[in-house]
């Protein structure tokens, strides 16, 4: 129960079509940009430990809300990150590195099946800081 409180503490539910839940992040700066490094050098990626990070895949659009930053490196595919606020959309393709800031709420519009290494920054209590609603068909 503590986990859900920690992760959901900064979220406020919004009305949404009956097939999905959507949450609004509150209390985060809204002006931090999505930072992208196009085709960084292998040595830079190795220094960050990117190739030891978890792998995330998607072949359809995904909605996300970040309570802290995500760093990712695209291994395959293409997606456009479309913020729900006035920040500009960003397209990532194979070989791109990005940092998505805390407070960002967005949709990953997947143009080609996506595979990326990902690192989620942690809250002070050590819990992961991103959250996505479970599918309605899940039994948990």
Image: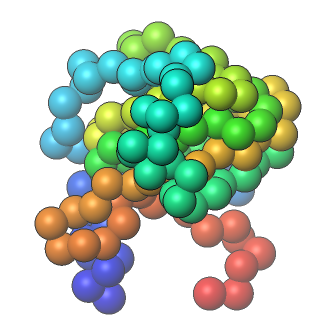
In which quadrant of the rendered image does the C terminus lie? bottom right
With respect to residue 112, does 14 lie above or below?
below
With respect to residue 66, does 38 lie above or below?
above
Q: How is the image coloured?
A: rainbow
Q: Is residue 97 left or right of residue 126?
A: right
In which quadrant of the rendered image does the N terminus lie? bottom left
Q: Decide which of 42, 88 is in the foreground and name it.
A: 42
With respect to residue 52, does 5 lie above or below?
below
Give x and y (percent) for residue 101.
33, 35
Residue 23 in view in this figure: no
Residue 32 in view in this figure: yes
Give x and y (percent) for residue 37.
47, 20
Give x and y (percent) for residue 82.
56, 23
Q: What residue is shown at x 77% (from left), y 37% (from top)?
A: 76
Give x and y (percent) for residue 99.
40, 33
Q: Decide which of 83, 79 is in the foreground and name it.
A: 79
Q: What residue is shown at x 59% (from left), y 26% (from top)?
A: 96
Q: Is residue 41 left or right of residue 130?
A: right
- Residue found farthest to the front: 43
Q: Quadrant of residue 18?
A: bottom right
Q: What residue is shown at x 46% (from left), y 20% (from top)?
A: 36
With respect to residue 126, does 10 lie above or below?
above
Q: How many marks?
A: 0
Q: What residue is shown at x 34% (from left), y 77% (from top)?
A: 4
């Amino acid at each position: 129960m503590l986990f859900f409180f920690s992760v959901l503490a900064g979220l406020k539910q919004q009305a949404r079509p009956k097939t999905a839940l959507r949450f609004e992040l509150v209390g985060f700066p809204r002006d931090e940009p999505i930072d992208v490094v196009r085709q960084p050098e292998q040595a830079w990626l190795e220094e960050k430990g990117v190739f030891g990070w978890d792998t995330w895949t998607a072949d359809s659009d995904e909605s996300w809300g970040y309570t802290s930053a995500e760093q990712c490196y695209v291994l395959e595919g293409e997606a456009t990150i479309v913020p729900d606020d006035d920040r500009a959309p960003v397209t990532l393709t194979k070989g791109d590195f990005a940092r998505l800031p805390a407070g960002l709420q967005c949709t990953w519009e997947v143009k080609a099946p996506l595979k990326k290494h990902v690192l989620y920054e942690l809250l002070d209590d050590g819990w992961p800081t991103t959250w996505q609603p479970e599918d309605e068909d899940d039994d948990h």
